[in-house]
Amino acid sequence: MHPEPHDELRVASFRDLDTTTLYEILKLRSEVFVVEQECAYLDPDGRDDEPGTRHLWFAQGKKVRAYLRILSDHGVERIGRVVTAPEARGAGLAGRLIEHALAVIGNRPAVLDAQAHLAGFYGRYGFETTGPEFLEDGIPHVPMANSRSAQ
């Protein structure tokens, strides 16, 4: 009997991503954001390879199961592209990624644009809505900031 595979947390800058991992990350983001959520937009937006960007993901072997990135935006850390593979949903991976992202960010201010129906999820990690709802690619979003860093 083989042990059940477990999800391993990985963190890297763009230059430390091997091509297979980068491909798996971009594939997952496209599968969920472009295909499943039917948002036609350019996911590789030129920010993944910025020097201050950090990529966090859970993987089983080479399979990326959940992912997010942290962009360094003029003294504010922006969490984005939070995504979980359909077969990995319900395992708490996104929440664990948010916790790890906040540990990486430390005391610096953290912001994100949440799909509106997920505002409560992010609220569990100290994020509060900071402005009115807006549409992005036809999906309602709300701007949020981490309350511990907004002080």
Image (cartoon, rainbow, N blue to C red):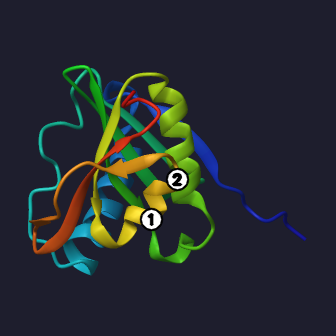
Residue 62: image tag: 2
Q: Amino acid at mark 1?
A: Gly
Locate residue 147: give its quadrant. Answer: top left
Question: In what element is the residue under mark 1?
Answer: helix
In the image, 91: left or right of 132?
right
Crowdedness near tag 2: few (<14), some (14–19) or many (≥20) residues, C-alpha within 10 Å: few
Provide residue 102's location: percent of width, then percent of height: 49, 35
In the image, 21: left or right of 78?
right
Provide residue 45's location: percent of width, then percent of height: 12, 45
Provide residue 71's location: percent of width, then percent of height: 28, 33
Q: Which residue is mark 1?
A: 120
The vertical placement of 95 against 140, above or below, is: above
Residue 108: image tag: none
Q: Nearer the viewer, residue 91 or 24?
A: 91
Q: Give the residue displayed 47% in from the left and 63% down from the top.
A: 121
In the image, 39: left or right of 115?
left
Q: Amino acid at mark 2?
A: Lys
Q: Give the residue displayed 29% in from the left and 47% down from the top.
A: 112
Crowdedness near tag 1: few (<14), some (14–19) or many (≥20) residues, C-alpha within 10 Å: some
* Alpha carbon separation for disc pair 2 and 1: 31 Å
Q: Give the residue displayed 46% in from the left and 76% down from the top.
A: 86
